[in-house]
């Protein structure tokens, strides 16, 4: 089945949720690291910055922890920049876990593909997603060319670029690349990168 092209950043709790969605949607998917959204200010800073350029989709588990994480994100991002998606409360346990969650409901990673697909269908816009990609053809090769990856001082250069864009320090090359593509044009990137 063809993936849905989602032109908005998608925020989920963890890496297993992200892996599940990668099989269904073509989108920039960010994780909060679970409760990392409470402990690490840079996570919220990144989400705020992304929401300045585009609405963001939030999809957390339908348990107590998911509600707390969603609440934290909701308090940090203006309501008109949030698209809230909710999974149904389905009793069960994820295959990789020995025990069900405390609430006994499946998390995003355990929800059936068809249910998840239906949640995202109203936001699928292949033309917008293709326009977004065409607008900024920035690649890993560009990062390498400007010393933002693959060089001894790449991490410090990435931190400089992140600071110029109001993003948190310490971002991985892939995370920074996706954020840069969302926030500025290719031409703006070239101008900034030349002066790092």
Image (cartoon, rainbow, N blue to C red):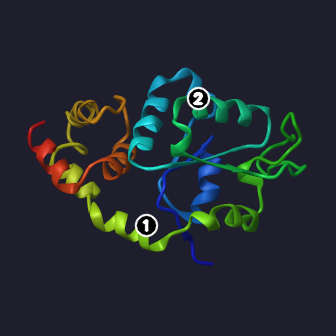
x and y percent of residue 30 in the render?
51, 45
Q: Secondary structure at mark 1?
A: helix
In the current view of this chain or complex, which residue is farthest to the bottom? 1
Any mark on residue 129, and which? 1
Neighbourhood count class around disc 1 (C-alpha, 10 Å): few under 14, some 14–19, many 20 upward: some
Above/below status of 46 relative to 191: above
Above/below status of 10 relative to 154: below
In the current view of this chain or complex, which residue is farthest to the left? 195
| Image point (35%, 68%), residue name | 131
Question: Which of the pair 97/139 is nearer the observer?
Answer: 139
First in sequence, mark 2 or 1: give its number. Answer: 2
| Image point (47%, 61%), residue name | 7
| Image point (43%, 30%), residue name | 45
Any mark on residue 75, and which? 2
Q: Of circles 2 and 1, which is in front?
A: 2
Q: Secondary structure at mark 2?
A: helix
């Amino acid at each position: 089945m063809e993936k849905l092209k989602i032109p908005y950043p998608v925020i989920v709790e963890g890496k297993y949720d992200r892996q599940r969605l990668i099989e269904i949607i073509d989108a920039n998917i960010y994780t909060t690291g679970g409760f990392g959204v409470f402990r690490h200010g840079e996570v919220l800073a990144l989400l705020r910055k992304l929401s300045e350029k585009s609405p963001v989709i939030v999809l957390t588990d339908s348990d107590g922890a998911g509600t707390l994480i969603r609440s934290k994100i909701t308090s940090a991002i203006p309501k008109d920049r949030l698209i809230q998606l909710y999974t149904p409360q389905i009793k069960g346990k994820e295959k990789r876990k020995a025990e069900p969650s405390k609430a006994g409901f499946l998390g995003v990673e355990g929800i059936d593909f068809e249910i998840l697909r239906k949640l995202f269908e109203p936001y699928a816009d292949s033309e917008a997603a293709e326009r977004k990609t065409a607008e900024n053809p920035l690649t890993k090769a560009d990062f390498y060319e400007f010393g933002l990856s693959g060089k001894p001082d790449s991490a410090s250069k990435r931190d400089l670029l992140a600071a110029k864009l109001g993003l948190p320090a310490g971002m991985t090359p892939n995370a920074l690349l996706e954020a840069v593509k969302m926030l500025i044009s290719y031409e703006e990137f070239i101008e900034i990168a030349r002066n790092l």
